[in-house]
Image: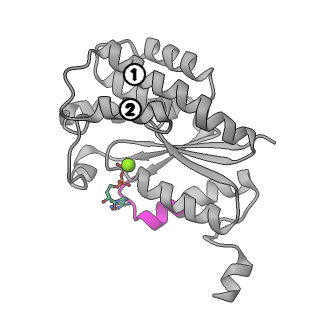
Amino acid sequence: MTGLFVVLEGGDGAGKTTQARFLDQWLEAWAVPHLLTREPGGSWLGSRIRELLLDPDSGPISPKAEALLYNADKAQHLADVVRPALGRGEVVVSDRYVDSTIAYQGAGRVLDPQEVRRLAEWATDGLVPDLTVLLDADVEATSGRLTSRDRLEAAGDDFHRRVRQHFLELASRDPGRYLVLSASDPREDIAAAVRRRLAPMIGIGPEPSPPAARMGS
Ligand SMILES: Nc1ncnc2c1ncn2[C@@H]1O[C@H](COP(=O)(O)OP(=O)(O)O)[C@@H](O)[C@H]1O
Ligand SMILES: [Mg+2]
């Protein structure tokens, strides 16, 4: 049995963590074995790398070093967390994956996005998500949602506009594997759209909980 690999992508404040929670509740209610994880940070090494990358007190990190750190996190995350869970037949929901690396590194305009993509493919042995949910928003719509700004979030609005364009371009290249939703929609509507898309892939209903559970409530 091979599981299902679902990725949430989008800028900071787009609602990835919020939607990961909705997905968690839905899969829990339908008793689907699943795992919630995130990049960077889903493995022991990843959480150390995450600290290095996102701590505002970190010194300057060169673009190539940054790309390698993100991809070191990815390689460990896949080996330790994602592949074992997929091997157990679980639905794996990852908050960010390869697209974030390509979009953010690409937006930095120093590295060639094609090179970053090849590096990420190498780090992940080319593991492609079954579905990527892209929460798309303009910077103005979601930057107000952020309270504390970490190192990446503190980058300028132009940078974030380029990140958004990279995400949209990646989605447009492989539409069958993407669900692009407006991050400004009500969170429950977004969650329902994600459930509608995933339900047939998993073989459960799109309702937040199965009929039997609802009857009792
Ligand atoms: N669809 C939405 N509409 C309005 N606010 C939202 C929506 N989704 C999430 N939020 C709020 O925006 C903030 C950032 O959401 P979060 O899920 O943490 O984003 P991310 O994980 O993508 O950075 C949180 O305060 C969250 O409650
Ligand atoms: Mg988050």
Magenta stretch contains residue 56: no
Determine whether 60 is above or below 191 in the image. Answer: above
Q: Nearer the viewer, residue 203 or 78?
A: 78
Vertical arrangement, residue 58 with respect to residue 178, above or below: above
* 177 sits left or right of 64 in the view: right
The residue drawn where x is 75% and y is 45% is 89
Which label's residue is closer to the chain start, 1 or 2?
Answer: 2
Return the x and y of residue 161 as percentages of the image width and height.
Answer: 27, 35
Task: State which region is magenta.
Answer: 183-191
Tell me what residue is drawn at x 46 percent, y 27 percent: 73
Amino acid type, residue under disc 2 in the picture = Arg
- Nearest the viewer among 55 and 158 is 55
Answer with left or right where residue 15 lies relative to residue 2: left
Residue found at x 36% / y 34%: 50
- Residue at 56% across, 56% down: 194
Q: Which residue is mark 2?
A: 48
Using the image as rendered, state which of residue 182 and residue 25 is in the foreground. Answer: 25
Q: Quadrant of the N terminus?
A: top right
Amino acid type shown at disc 1: Leu
Estimate the x, y position of residue 6 in percent, counting from the top left: 59, 44
Residue at mark 1:
69
- How far is mark 1 from mark 2, CA to CA? 10 Å
Residue 176: assigned label: none
For label 1, the SS is helix
